[in-house]
Image (tube, rainbow, N blue to C red):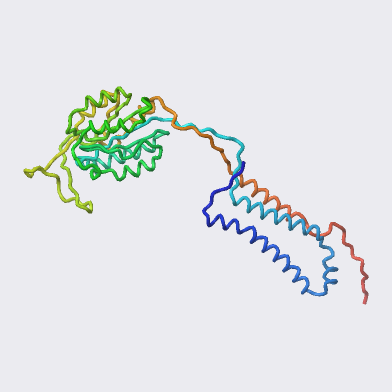
Amino acid sequence: MIRFEDYPALLQWGLYALLPALIIVGVWARASRKNIIKRAGDPHLIEQLSHSVSKQKRRIKDLLRAAAILLVLFASFGPKFSDQLTEVHREGVDIVILLDVSNSMRAQDIKPDRLEKARFELRKLLKELKGDRIALVVFAGQAHLQTPLTLDYAAFEMFLDISDESLIGVQGTSFENAIEMGLKAFDQEDKQHRAMIIISDGEDHEGNVDDVLQRAKEENVVIHTAGIGSFSGTPIPLFDDRGKLKGYRKTSTGEIVTTRLYVGTLQTISMETDGRFVHLNTASASLDEIYTDILGMDQKEFSRHEFTNYKEQFHWFVWLALLLLVLDLLVSDLHSIDRNWEGDYVQK
């Protein structure tokens, strides 16, 4: 089987136009050579003077050059050949990310802020995925499915970049609503190969997760948690429409509201579901440990398909064209006979 390189349309049509252009140039050059010979003098005399030139050999040399040009042109189309089919299996685990986008995630105890640190770690995780499907749930006082399970990591990252506190109208933090939405995001026909990752500062304003954790265990969902933030109180910044800091969030009595990392609920969630807790408090901390655990889970097959494995073969045509040009240089267009002087010497 053969296929050619997919060039941009303009370049593709340019290559198509080369062949007729070369034919026109060749015909024009041949006609020009004949006209030059006609204008050079008496045709019979020119024929006598060029008697040593073999017309047959000149045709052979012309054919060698034309064939070399055609081979180079064919090679420029990027021919690819293959005679084998390759079967590809895509296996992995369904992973649902629960990302806390409450106001407290804007605290700057981790630079530039907690939410941006969480996004950064998730982008790193995307680069490590090996065929896993991934979904995104954003939550605060309520939860919203931002991206369903997908293998399109670029689309996931696009929605991750626009995930912030403006997406959720009810502020606060409710792990119960978040986990319920996360459970709905999984494939309901497959009760295996499921993992969930919660990234939050741990402030749970609802405080009731026992029932939903029981459901998670019944549905074989392993929940890993990642705490983000420091243990000391940090003010929650307020920004204007241009993203410029305009102050800090305050209570009705004028006191500055502070937020800190609460690990209790996060650790409870991970322990109850056989997951892992990590603390994303430094530049070296990451989700690698969690993903290592996920890689140890049973993998399921998401897709299987066959494709033809084409290999570049243009270089063979270039080498053949080069060989023809070398032959053109080696072939003489003169008759291969001895040319002896048969005239008379004139003595004075």
* Residue 293 figure quarter: top left
Name the quarter where the C terminus is drawn: bottom right
Q: Is 299 on the left or on the right of 217, as rendered? A: right
Judged from this view, the residue extending furthest toward the bottom is 348
* Res 216 → quadrant: top left
Question: Horizontally, is 258 left or right of 185 in the view?
Answer: left
Please tell me which residue is depicted at 93% across the width and 74% down the height of the picture.
Answer: 347
Q: Position of residue 290 (x, y in %)?
A: 33, 30
Front residue of this view, candidates 8 and 61: 8
Q: Nearer the viewer, residue 235 or 343?
A: 235
Residue furthest left in the image: 253
Quarter in which the N terminus is drawn: top right
Image mark count: 0
Residue shown at the point (67%, 60%) measured from the top left: 23
Left or right position of 100 against 32: left
Query: What is the x, y in percent for residue 300?
Result: 42, 27
Query: Furthest residue to the front?
Result: 189
The percent position of residue 8, horizontal first and vertical second, equals 51, 53
The residue located at (38%, 27%) in the rendering is: 189
Residue 194 in the image, given as x and y percentages of width and height: 35, 28
The quarter holding residue 262 reads top left
